Image (tube, grey):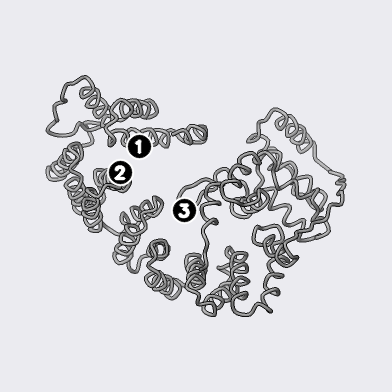
Amino acid sequence: MDRLHQIKAWLSVDEKASAYRWAGELAFIEQNLGAAQDFLLRSLNEKESAELRARVESIRSRLLGKKAAAPATPAPEKPVDDLGMSDEEKEIYARMIRSYDSQDFVSAIEDGVQLIQKFPGGKRASEASDRVLEIYLSLSSRTDEKYRHVRESVVKEMSKADGGRLARWANNAYARGNYIDALNLAEQSHQKLAGHPDSTKVLLLAGEAAVSCGEYNDAAKHFERLMKEHAGTPEAAEGMFRLGLLEYRRQKYPQATAYFERLLALSAGRDFEYRALYWQWRTQQKIDPARASAHAQKLVTKYPLSYYGLRAKGELNGGVIELGNKATPIKAELRLLESERLAWERLGVLLKAGWFKEAEKELDSLPEPQSNEERLIRAKFWAATLRYDMAIQIMNSVFESDPTLLQTSTLRIIFPDEYLPWIAREAKNTGLAPQWILSLIRQESGFRHDAKSPGQCTWLNATLAFNSPRIGP
C-alpha cells in the first residue's frame, strides 16, 4: 500500500477503490479485522458499493462482539437489478454469496462457474467471474499445505468456464507468478477458443507459462503451433523469438540461431530485432566464436545506445566503451507564425512553473523540426517535460542521419539524472553499474512512467525483473 500511495495521483477512482478493497480482503484473510474495516471504508470513500457496505457492517459487528445475522439473500446494489433475472439465476447467485461469506470457497467457485455457464451474458455472470478470480487470487497467496488441495479443486472448477474467461484468469495467474495454474488454464482456454482469433494470444501465454514452470517440451510445442497456425502475427513473431531463447537455454545452439535468423527476416519481427541480434551474437559465440564479432558489429551499428549494443561494444573493445566528448553547439533559426510564437512563449512559462502536461500540448502544436539542429532543440524540450521517450525517438533519427553527433554532450539529453538516486540503490542490489541500468531502462521503457510489464510492474522494477535472470545455461 505504501507503493500505491506513491503513485496515487495516477490512479483512477476505480483503481484506488479496488486497491483498498484488496488490502481489506487480505487483512480479513489474516483475521486483522481492524485493518480490514479501515481499508474497506477507504474503498467506500472512493466508490460506493452496497455489497461492500454490508461487509463492513458485518466486520464492525464482529469487532463489537456481536455476530451479524447472515441474510438469506444478498442485498443487491439496486433493487431494479433483480427484475429481469430468473428465479434460478437469483438462487445460484445468492448461494454463491453465502458460500463466499462463510469462506466455503470451493462451493462458491462451483456456483460461480454454474452461473457463468447457464447465464453467460448476464450481469451476475460478470460479477461471478470477478468473484471467482478474487477467490483464486486470495488462495494462491496462501502457502500452507492445507490450502493446496483447496486451490487444486478451485482451478479444476474454473477450467469448466468458457474460453474467454479462462484466458482472463490465466493472464492473472501468470501475472501473480502462478505459472502451473496459468499453463493449465491457458491450455483449457485454447481448446475452447479453437478457430477464434483470441486463441493466438492464449497460445502465446501457454508457451510463456510453460517456460516459466520448466515444462520446456510443452513450451516448444505451443510456440511451434503458434508459428504454424498464426503465421504473420506479432504473437507468432514473439513465439519464434521465445523458441530461439528456449533452444539456447537447452544448449541447442544451431536450432536457436536458425530461429533468430528467421525472425530477423520477418517484417512482423521488427519489434524483436535488437533482441534477436543480441541473442544471435551470443549463440554464434557458442557455435563459431571467430564469426561472432561480425554479429556483434551489426548490433553496435544499428543499436549503438541500447543496453545490448553497449554490451557488444564493450566486449569488442576489451571491456572499454569510448564515446566522443566533443562539445556540440546547437544553433537554429526558427521561423514561426504568430500563433506558434505565442505557443513557444507559453511553453517556456509552463516549463518554469512545472506544468509539464500543459507544456506537452504546446510542444505538440509547434511545427515539425526540419534540421538536426532543430531536432536536438525539440528533444531537449521533450526531455524537460519528462517525456524522455519522445526525446529518444527524435535523438535516434538525429544519430542515424549524422553519427558524428553521437557525443556525450548530446547523450545527456536522453540519459536523465533525476532518477539516479533510485537507480544507484537498485544497482547496488543487483550488482550492475548504474550506467548499465540507465541504458537498460532507456531500451525497454524509454523512461515512461506508464510503461508496464506483462506482470503489471512499472518501468524500473519491470526492467530489472525481466532482464536479471540468466537465459542460458
**3D distance between C-alphas at marks 1 and 2:** 9 Å
Rendered location of residue 323, percent (x, y): 79, 56
Q: Would you call the spot at circle 2 few (<14 residues within 10 Å), some (14-19), or many (20 or more)?
A: some
Q: Mark 2 or mark 1, which is nearer the start of the sequence?
A: 1
Q: Would you call the spot at circle 1 few (<14 residues within 10 Å), some (14-19), or many (20 or more)?
A: some
Quadrant of res 300: bottom right
**3D distance between C-alphas at marks 3 and 2:** 20 Å
- Residue bearing the label numbered 3: 454
Q: Which of the image's four quarters has the N terminus? A: top left
Residue type of the residue flagged with mark 3: Pro
Q: Is residue 89 above or below residue 7?
A: below
Rendered location of residue 228, percent (x, y): 43, 76
Q: Mark 3 or mark 1, which is nearer the start of the sequence?
A: 1
Which of the pair 404/62 is nearer the observer? 62
Horizontal side, residue 323 vs residue 287: left or right? right
Q: Are marks 1 and 2 in contact (CB under 8 Å)?
A: no
Task: Identify the disc placed on residue 22.
Answer: 1
Q: Secondary structure at mark 1?
A: helix
Q: How many labels sit on residues? A: 3
Horizontal side, residue 426 vs residue 78: left or right? right
Q: Would you call the spot at circle 3 few (<14 residues within 10 Å), some (14-19), or many (20 or more)?
A: few
- Residue bearing the label numbered 2: 138
Identify the residue at image location x=35%, y=27%.
Answer: 44
Q: Secondary structure at mark 2?
A: helix
Rendered location of residue 359, percent (x, y): 68, 35
Quadrant of res 341: top right
Q: Is residue 186 above or below residue 350?
A: below
Residue type of the residue flagged with mark 2: Ser
